[in-house]
Image: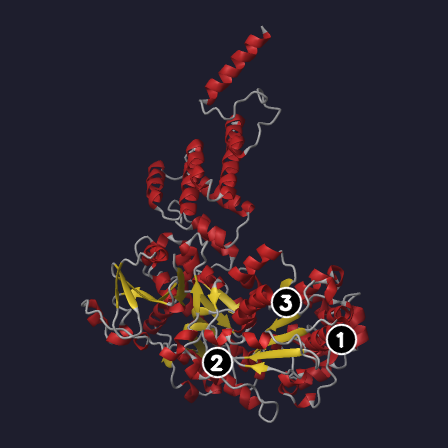
Amino acid sequence: MYKLRFTRSAISGIQRYPDVIEAISRFCEGHFGEHKALKGGDKLLRTRQGNHRIIWTRINETTILVVKVGNRKDIYENNLGSVEQALEEMEPEELNWADLGIQVTMVENLPTYELPVNNSSLRQFFYGSYLYSPVLTDEQRKLLPNLTNFASYSQGIDSLLIQSAPGTGKTICAVLLACNLYENYEYNIILILPKNLCHDIWEYEQIKDIRAKYNNESFFVGTLEQWIESLYPELFSQIATLEEQKIALKQEAKRIHITDLNDPNENDVKLYTSFIYAIDESIKNNQERILYKQNREKIEQLSKINKTRFQANLNNKILRVDALELLSQKLIPETITPRKSTVFIVDEAQDYLLKELKLISNVMLNRWREEHQHPSLFWLLGDLNQRIQPVDFDWGDLHLNKIHSLVYNYRNSKKILEFANIFQEIAQKLTKGTKALPSASDLESGFEEGDPVKVLEVSTTYDIEKLLSKISGKTKKSEENSDRYLLKKLAEQAYVIHNRQETVNKMAQFSNINHLNVADAKGREFDGCILVLSGCNSKEYLDANNCYTAATRPRQRLLVVMTSSEIEAIGREKLGNCEFFDTSDEHLESLVTWIAQSSNAESGLKDTDVVINNIINQVPDLYFDTYSVLNFIKASDEQIHEVESTLISKLKKCDVNSLESQLKELESLRDIGDRVGLRCLILRALDRSWDAVTEAFCIKADDPQKYHRLLNAISTELESKGLPYEAARIRAKVHRKLPNEYPFSEKFPTDDHSPLVAILCKLAVNRIKSEV
């Protein structure tokens, strides 16, 4: 048995050409199909699968890395230089890493994903769940020594900062190394994450393994609020919501007649909290820092809000920083872990209050060391260039004693980095004379050159709507039967990031498009996306950070939408390496086709309601991967029951011959979970309940939970039709008895498969005989 790993390029190719999945699945058993070793010295091999090509190599005796997958007409473009040459079957006998656009020195740091040994659905893996099985690169593994030698540190709390650019794998480092520290070094782990990342991180294979083995003992992964709740639920219940904070601010502003705060927004609340309510008095020259300068007028107004009156307006509620202060003063390590040391990790640390970070480190962890002989490491990960919250501090304010940077950018192409750095340079200029920001991403740290960033120059909102309308109606050319796979369809959805929330609200009506603001997009990534920059200029620090953060979300393709005035505000000359387009139909069509060629499969599964709506509207030709998708989104039994009931109701209205034809077609479906589930669905719609039971029996050994669910669903349907005895016979297969109120319940032979009428007649005759 071989372990299989895949580069992102390979996974993108598989998503575009799903016909290769079955061939790749056989690699695990050492069956590589029609393959040959290629000359060139880099030990690359090629497998032919029809018109598709799979380029791979052996990492070691037990592990195979699939490097690239594509159609023969495009997989060699990097080294043949023309599609025509490939079409003539003049495939190269010699191939090196450089021919694939990868420097040999960077091979050890290629981001890869490993197929879990117990994976039950390859399609599910390639269309999204691969993200939950990342492998540490060589650069990331080298961080481990910085995390394992702090227990003997005697000069206060040991601390480590990973300040690195977007796409360098900070979060993956935190998660995978935290798992390593927990299992191999027996540290108590507390990993604090942004809310929008938690769901994905909880799905990591390593996280799930630890939770299954150790039941979360001494291992926490979640938001700061969730951590507080896990320790002190009553304290958590006292934390005021954002809306409650807005109301408290508004009430006091109204009392003292500050008209500009009649309708405070989220930014006002955070400015008040950061610069007034929870200000760190130890910071000198705070008023000379960029965020204070750019918000001076607003902060001066907010400074008139009395802290005591603001607290009173919260009606016995407190802020998160208050809850953390109470917790940090009384929490002792012995109450939360039997382990002797703790690693406290904060991801995206640049967006927390300085006071919050100091409470964790200087108060709580320091007290643990001094009073409880419990050494700890305070590990922060972040990037000041991606700060999108109005909290103003520099890493130096935390007096950290170890700083490390990750160099390689595993996400963005060099062309995308070049565009994103325009906004980082704007931020650098705005902060000139104050604390210097970290350097911009080095273009050479990117793995791929990538396509040039494309800029659509628009005049009005109507032009943007025209583009989105074309994208919404775009149907990509699919291979045979690929339109029957929901994962493939979801991969075709477009993602649009807006630097202003108001444009998100305006554009939400277009279907097949997902609209995100910068906060929602942060921490996520896409093969390709559209960035709508509204009101963008070169004067606002946080706006520059927002644009920089948004521009670093796509891996390969980025389409930017800006007005002429916004382009001039940034500097048209700075966009010299971008390709410009106007709003003519010809240009819009080419842009839509270009952006549609990128796959966003993993992101298409985020919205459960959208996924379920797609499933129930695909009748009569059901999606082949219906149950794989339901499993992927972790649909509950209740949700699955609703989906099945809706589909059966719709299928009953379809032509019987078409259902019989589809039943036959599904026999060849490779995934047993999808095959059995879908065939049962059609058999139930055809009122062939016992045939559905026979079909369900195929998964009894491999998936007893699904087997029980199917039989219970079938028996419930029979009961609703007034067939209680038939329902009982089916339930008997999962060890459930006939209800006592049914006639003959005490003697009904649930294991007798004779016709029901014959059984009932026999029971009636026996009763008559016994009474005579």
* Disc 3 packing (10 Å; few <14; some 14–19; many ≥20): many
User: Which secondary structure lies at badge 2?
Assistant: loop
- The tag earlier along the polypeptide, 3 or 1, is 3
Q: What amino acid type is highlighted by mark number 2?
A: Val
According to the picture, the residue beneath numbered tag 3 turns out to be 187
Residue situated furthest top in the rendering: 772
Front-most of residues 143 and 51: 143
Label 1 secondary element? helix
- The residue drawn where x is 40% and y is 58% is 489
Residue 339 in the figure: left or right of residue 370: left
Kindly identify which residue carries mark 1: 370
From the top left corner, tell me how far across and down residue 497 is, in percent.
49, 71
Label 3 and label 1: CA atoms lie apart by 18 Å
Q: Nearer the viewer, residue 367 or 222?
A: 367
Query: Which of pointers 3 and 2 lies earlier in the amino acid sequence?
Result: 3
Q: In front: mark 1 or mark 2? A: 1
